[in-house]
Image (cartoon, helix red, strand yellow):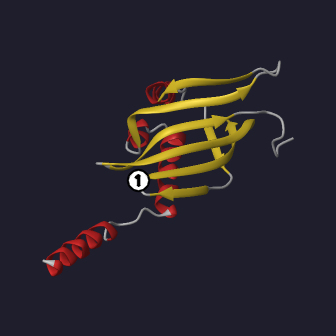
Amino acid sequence: MKLFLLLISFLGSTLCFSQQDFSEAQAKQIIKTFFEGFHSGDTLQMKRVVVSNAVLQTAATDKNGVHSVTDGAISSLLAAIAKRPSNQRWEERILDYTIHIDGNLAQVWTPYEFWVNDTFSHCGANSFTLVKTNDGWKIQHIIDSRRRSGCNQE
């Protein structure tokens, strides 16, 4: 009986540890895929790496010093990208990646600069929460900050 329990325990732990680990490189690739779609206007590419009910938020401070967090939906972002005029180019330049992974959860922090038709607009940071779903790893939540002061472009 003890041998049977030992065998079951061994097989159970082998199955748990044999799952493929999610790497920082894979997390980074999800974010890169998201922005490739963002830059090219390919909303289908973006949809492949986000859950359908992904949450979007922006943390900002207005010119009067009032702090706020605004909520959005992935569908609104995708609609804006789909309707973007062809002569308008949005470029979010990712400056760095900080990635933390624990089991089925990953966090990716990306400071950025945002440019419209080669003109600097603003800077800030994105915080992406990635989760492991039955369809693979996806972006569940994006919150970003936006500011015009304290950027490297000043």
- Can the viewer see residue 123 in this picture? yes
Q: Which residue is at the front of the view, 98 or 81?
A: 98
Q: Is residue 132 left or right of residue 114?
A: left
Q: Residue furthest front?
A: 1
Image quadrant occupied by the C terminus: top right
Marker count (numbered) = 1
Residue 6: image quadrant is bottom left
Residue bearing mark 1: 104
Q: Residue furthest top?
A: 64
Residue 91: image quadrant is top right
Image coordinates of residue 101 in percent, x first then y, are 50, 57
Residue visible at 77% across and 22% down?
Answer: 62
Vertical relation: 11 (above or below) 120: below
- Can the viewer see residue 87 in this picture? no
Residue visible at 22% across and 73% down?
Answer: 11
Residue visible at 30% across and 66% down?
Answer: 16
Image coordinates of residue 14 in percent, x first then y, are 28, 73
Image quadrant occupied by the N terminus: bottom left
Q: Is residue 6 left or right of residue 80?
A: left
Image coordinates of residue 75 in percent, x first then y, are 43, 27
Q: How crowded is the residue under tag 1: few (<14 C-alpha within 10 Å), some, or many (20+)?
A: few
Q: Is residue 59 left or right of residue 57?
A: right
Q: Residue furthest bottom?
A: 3
Regarding mark 1 in the picture, which secondary structure is present there?
loop
Residue type at numbered disc 1: Asn
Vertical relation: 86 (above or below) 135: above
Image coordinates of residue 8 in percent, x first then y, are 19, 72
Vertical relation: 144 (above or below) 28: above
